[in-house]
Amino acid sequence: MIENNKVYSNNGYGITFSRNMTNSVVRNNFVHNQMNAIFVSASHNNEVYNNTILNSDDGISFANGASNNKVHDNRIINSVNALRFNADSHENTLYSNKIVNATQNTIKYDDQNTKDNNNDNSSTLNRNT
């Protein structure tokens, strides 16, 4: 459980799921001024929710085969890419996330296969201004 933290101005990552982290929860955190606010790498069956992410390059990123993670009810504000899926991430589910002012991509997929193998549920709020 990673909860109720203020994470800011680190070089690189704010909160990271390291390889093979499973059945973990990241919730109720305030993460700002990061290159990657929350990074899920080669980790599975985790849940990321009720976090506020502000002023990041990538808000929440999935890489290296991250799978079966649930991401919901997060607020991602002033990011370059609010949500990012690198190649080989699959079967991750997004819903009820509020995205405000993503300057490049609300959701960035590295390739079509990655896009096809993750589930957006079409409930992510897109509010680019």
Image (cartoon, helix red, strand yellow):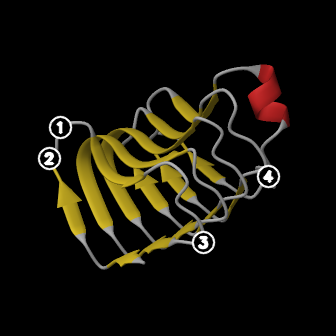
Residue 27 in picture, x, y percent from top left: 44, 74
Q: Nearer the viewer, residue 98 or 92?
A: 92
Q: Which residue is mark 4?
A: 122
Q: CA distance from mark 1 to mark 3?
A: 27 Å
Q: Secondary structure at mark 1?
A: loop
For the N terminus, which image quadrant? Answer: bottom left
Residue lying furthest right:
116
Q: Earlier in the sequence, mark 4 or mark 3?
A: 3
- Counting residues from the start of the chain, the first of labels 4 and 2 encountered is 2
Q: CA distance from mark 4 to mark 2?
A: 32 Å
How far across and down, in percent of the image, does residue 65 sit?
Answer: 66, 39
Q: Would you say 27 lies left or right of 31 here?
A: right
Say if 37 sits above or below 64 in the image: below
Q: Which residue is mark 2?
A: 9
Q: Secondary structure at mark 4?
A: loop
Foreground: 5 or 32?
A: 5
**Callout 1–callout 3 Cβ contact below 8 Å:** no
Picture residue at 29% right of the left edge, 58% below the top: 31
Residue type highlighted by circle 3: Asn
Q: Identify which amino acid the numbered label 4 is placed on.
A: Ser
Q: Is residue 34 left or right of residue 113?
A: left
Q: Nearer the viewer, residue 40 or 107?
A: 40
Amino acid type, mark 1:
Asn
* Residue at left offset 60%, top offset 65%: 46
Q: Which residue is mark 3?
A: 23
Residue 40, image x, y percentages: 50, 49
Residue 90 falls in image quadrant: top right
| Amino acid type indicated by mark 2 | Ser
Disc 2 crowd rating (10 Å Cα; few below 14, some 14-19, many 20+) is some
What is the quadrant of residue 13 in the picture?
A: top left
Check disc 1 and report the residue beneath it: 11
